[in-house]
Amino acid sequence: MRRNTVYLLLIVAFFYSCGSNDRGELVGAKTKTKWYGEKPYGMVLIPGGSFTMGSQDEDVSNAFNTPTRTVTVRPFYMDETEITNSEYKEFVFWVRDSVVRTKLALLAEELAYGKEPSKEGIQRFQFMNIDTTKASPYVKYMLKYYGSLGDFNSPTQGKVLNWKEKLDWSPNRFTDEYYAEVMDTMFVPIDESINGRKMIDVKKLKYSYAWLDIESAAKSTGNRKDFIRKEVVNIYPDTTVWVKDFNYSYNDPMHQDYFWHEAYADYPVVGVSWKQAKAFSNWRTKKKNDYLKSKKHPSTVPQFRLPTEAEWEFAARGGLNFAIYPWGGPYTTTDRGCFLANFKPSRGDYAVDGALYTMEAKSYNPNGFGLYNMAGNVSEWTNSAYQESSYNFGATMNPNVEDAKNNRKVIRGGSWKDVAYFLQVSTRDFEYGDSARSYIGFRTVHDYLGTNLTGKKTKTRKNK
């Protein structure tokens, strides 16, 4: 009898622990998915670590805004080049097409109300239907009680746009009058066109997104919705900066061709404000996550964003802690007299370094981390607000100044129109975040998940 009791207890214990082999030990929550540390395309790993931030030399400008201090930044990925016209143009095209498809879908839905389903003319661009017969209980619940799977406050009410149908921008091939009606809203008025050419009204190209203000939420109390910020940004670059930035100067060809002509596809985009650069970063995150979702990949990538001022300086130094320039220094030419960056070497002689304006984003030699043009070519937006004394009160671990009320944003690196002083890795400058210039561009960064400080390739890891 006693032996039978023991057997019974073992059987109960077996069924009680069925499906688990942890032997009752604390092993952590496990998932069925694996996480892969994928290197983002076109980016290089900046290993992170500590460095001496600020200027070790004489403060020739007497700004006294770069006292030396030791700071530490976490590892991150950074674009090896500035964002190019071609890359930014992909953003512009996506916004343009999404605006048009939204207009077409809304009008198609209005015209189809109370009628038999059709796929002719504009009806080809209706919102995508969800097959409720195969839908999960969650999808059925959302459709029943909310009418959509997304943001029902958005113009599309969370419905999915039809990206399968090809858009035709040639007026001679418009499918019907309703299609022409929608397209007409995207072009400049007839009385503003030149030689009868149909041109896109770039004021219609607006990108909407929301983000959570974690800095404010962490320092105060309130509901989550109180810290959700919504942005609507006109994303088209200001091409007139080539004219406005320089009085009595013939820069009309740059105004007409720089952003659109194929000859400048690999040149850094300019005329982009700080807010537009932030919008681009948000869209790039969305683009990657939408792809992962389409492949039924449960993981999401960290946000693409602008670098902090400290991250930018650490990356620009390229592993040379006390360097003056990204290549070391103290000279701006090689021993053969070849210039090491695109800047203004002497008064008025912009072309002596081989470039009158900007050059291709991947030009000159990269620094120790593999980053191109961290000095010269175009200055670059950072995520940090500009405070003259921020080095004196800022943190020494991942320092950054987040101040939404401060419209002065730090720019770094100097540009094609600047003298050598602004190319130094420690030199600070600022521009107003709502302004755009012919000499300011940007590059994005992407957080590295983990604490690897060596820059070496890590093995695939499985979440626990």
Image: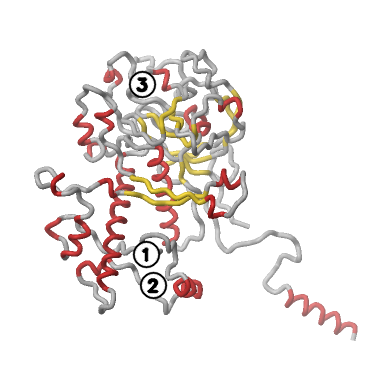
Q: Is 270 in front, or is 443?
A: 270
Q: Earlier in the sequence, mark 1 or mark 2?
A: 2
Instruction: Identify which amino acid the numbered label 1 is placed on.
Output: Val
To which quarter of the image does residue 150 belong?
bottom left
Q: Is residue 194 left or right of residue 445?
A: left
Instruction: Identify which amino acid the numbered label 2 is placed on.
Output: Ile
Residue under circle 3?
418
Placement of 337 over or under 446, stated as above or below = above
What residue is at 49 percent from the left and 74 percent from the top?
A: 141
Residue under circle 1?
160
Q: Is 253 in front, or is 452?
A: 253
CA neighbours of label 3 inside 10 A, class few (<14), some (14 to 19), many (20+): many
Image position, residue 76 (x, y; %): 52, 40
Find out whether the residues at labels 1 and 2 contact each other: C-beta distance under 8 Å: yes
Find out whether the residues at labels 3 and 2 contact each other: C-beta distance under 8 Å: no
Q: Which numbered dot is residue 130?
A: 2
